[in-house]
Amino acid sequence: MVRINISDIASIVGVSPATVSNALNGKSGVSEETRQKIIKIAREYGYFKDNIFNTLQKTIRFIMYKKHGFVVCDTPFFTSLIEGITKESKAQGYELLISHVNFNEKDNKELIETIEKDYSEGILILATEMTSEDLLVLKNVNVPIVMLDSYFKNSDFDSVLINNVDAAYKATEYLIMNGHTNIGYLHSSVHINNFYYRRRGYLEALTDYALKADKKFEIPLEPTAEGSYRDMSLYLKQKNVALPTAFFADNDIIALGAMRALKESGIKIPEDVSIIGFDDMPFCEISTPKLTTLKVFKQEMGKAAVRRLVDKIKENDNSVQKIEINTQLVVRESVLKIN
């Protein structure tokens, strides 16, 4: 095979030598499509055997997978998560590349193309909105992969996520310790793996304290600020509507939307109904009342995912690990002690 230089690659691709140099060194100013073309040609002609670029050999890609966008959106949760990933990647000596992939109903073509064209040593996938069926397209991928913010049973992929069962148990137990025995659940109307496990934690706490879940108080709300407000408003407009003394919510966004609807209906929080959220978003400190919630260590979760991925890259570690990050209860003003 004939070895080529930067000028040769530039001629083949139809770009300037400077563009080739920038692409091979991982610098900005080059479109992802052009970068991949340049790397493909460089590999085909054996360029990297004589020219080892550290940035190419030390790259991690973070794929933000969006299936419906109800949860994976521009919120402080994901901003903090990315910040943790970025910091730890740099600390480990890796450049971080970020891709946004939207769900393709037919065959997840965009996700596969992103991975197949990639030259990174390892890949992190934000799996918040993924289902177990979405993983099938990844079964023949040979690059190390770590799933972030979700867990799938019988999966061959490592996962780093919140300890959802324990956290929801902790939140429900806190309500019980404050005298609440009639506890409802504001849950997402959209399926998210994490929320499934939060419901498990909620139910386990009730069972352990000899309490029963009342189906009429398990209210499905769209997991957006406006959607949860709208759905809760519709629920409250029903005839002879009943309420528990407290609610556990799948996340803070659902909790805040529901609180808005409750207050507009003349229901006082926490005097009439207590609410506890999940995530500890910044707006929890400025809501009225301030929201009691579970603090998720978002940056730490991102850092842990990078460390696990680097271990798989460096140590060729083929074991499958599930790493759960615990939460911390943050007590504010939205839960009333009634005993």
Image (cartoon, helix red, strand yellow):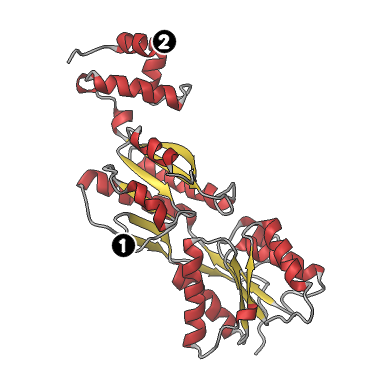
Q: Nearer the viewer, residue 289 or 132?
A: 132
Instruction: Kindly identify the residue that appears in the image at 73 percent across and 71 percent down.
Output: 235
Instruction: Kindly identify the residue that appears in the image at 57 percent across and 84 percent down.
Output: 176
The quarter holding residue 50 reads top left
Rendered image: mark on residue 163: none
Q: Residues within 10 Å of mark 1 (few under 14, many from 20)?
A: few
Q: Quadrant of the N terminus?
A: top left
Rendered image: mark on residue 154: 1
Please give left or right for residue 307 compared with residue 217 in the image: left
Instruction: Kindly identify the residue that appears in the image at 34 percent across and 47 percent down.
Output: 138
Indicate which disc, 1 or 2, sits on the residue closer to the N terminus.
Answer: 2
For the view shown, which residue lies furthest in the left direction? 1
**Badge 1 amino acid:** Asn
Q: Nearer the viewer, residue 52 or 137?
A: 137
**Badge 2 amino acid:** Ser
Q: From what the image shows, is residue 82 above or below residue 264?
A: above
Please give left or right for residue 244 compared with residue 172 in the image: right
Rendered image: mark on residue 16: 2
- Element carrying mark 1: loop
The quarter holding residue 113 reads top left
Please give left or right for residue 67 compared with residue 7 in the image: right
Q: Position of residue 56 (x, y in %)?
A: 32, 29
Q: Quadrant of the C terminus?
A: bottom right
